[in-house]
Amino acid sequence: MNKNIQKEKAESLLEKYLQTIGINTDDANFIQTPERIYRMHKDMLHALSKEGKQEVKQILSKTFPSLSNDMVVFSPLKVVTLCPHHFLTVRLTCHIAYIPKGNKVIGLSKIPRLVELLAKQPILQEDLLHLIADTLHKQTLNEGVYVIIQGRHSCMCDRGVKTTARAINSAIRGVFKKQATRDEALKLITLSDGDNEK
């Protein structure tokens, strides 16, 4: 479908939806709301697009020679995704450790870019966790990957049970299955400011 036609159709459907739930779309505050919603979701769902999928492949395609095969930790990485059940925001803090292999490392900007891109879709926190871990472990040369995600879910905090609790989960690949290796990663993560509210 032509992108302009797709945009017009989406905005028309959004306008009808707003009218259905009682919004006066002739009100000055809502005249451009369908367009704003469309543009917002277009950006927040970028990972689902053809361009987004291509970016995922390209981000990790280049590595750099290094004298080191020591652990690298990225923490905290803050991103926003969408809950697939309510399309409300989920604010995530990610902590990622990996151990390079073959004296080749990933560019320092690549992992934050990958996490941000993979988060741009409606996805369960549990599934995003494994998507990040599997993508890093399978698409780069490494001994192992350790990913921890903390999530503040608007669907829980702002409606329903209205709890301020965060969901926390982790995924382990390769050498991080060894307790000593995990402990080293956790010590390095602790050195970073992992407070989700800052």
Image (cartoon, rainbow, N blue to C red):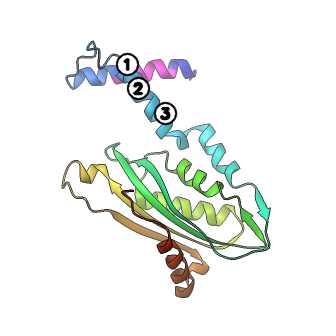
How far, Cα to Cα, is label 1 from label 2?
A: 6 Å
- Return the disc, 1 or 3, that comes first in the chain's sequence: 1
Q: Which residue is mark 1?
A: 32
Q: Residue at x 34, y 56 (%)?
A: 152
Quadrant, the C terminus: bottom left
- Disc sitting over residue 42 in the figure: 3
Q: Who is closer to the viewer here, 99 or 194?
A: 194
Q: Amino acid at mark 3?
A: Lys
CB contact under 8 Å: marks 2 and 3: no
- Tell me, yes or no, if residue 83 can be seen here: no
The magenta span reads: 6-14
Q: Is residue 8 magenta?
A: yes
Return the x and y of residue 197 as percentages of the image width and height: 36, 57
Q: Secondary structure at mark 1?
A: loop
The reply to whether the C-beta atoms of the residues labelled 1 and 2 are less than 8 Å apart is yes
Q: Any magenta on residue 160? A: no
Q: In the displayed structure, does residue 97 sit left or right of residue 63?
A: left
Q: Which mark is residue 88?
A: none
Q: Say which of marks 2 and 3 sits in front.
A: 2
Task: Tell me what residue is drawn at x 68 percent, y 77 percent.
Answer: 70
Question: How many C-alpha atoms fall within 10 Å of the one at disc 3: few (<14), some, or many (≥20)?
Answer: some
Q: Residue 7 at what x, y percent from top left?
A: 48, 22
From the image, tell me which residue sits under label 2. Answer: 36
Q: Earlier in the sequence, mark 2 or mark 3?
A: 2
- Residue type at mark 1 is Gln
Indicate the secondary structure of the residue bearing disc 2: helix
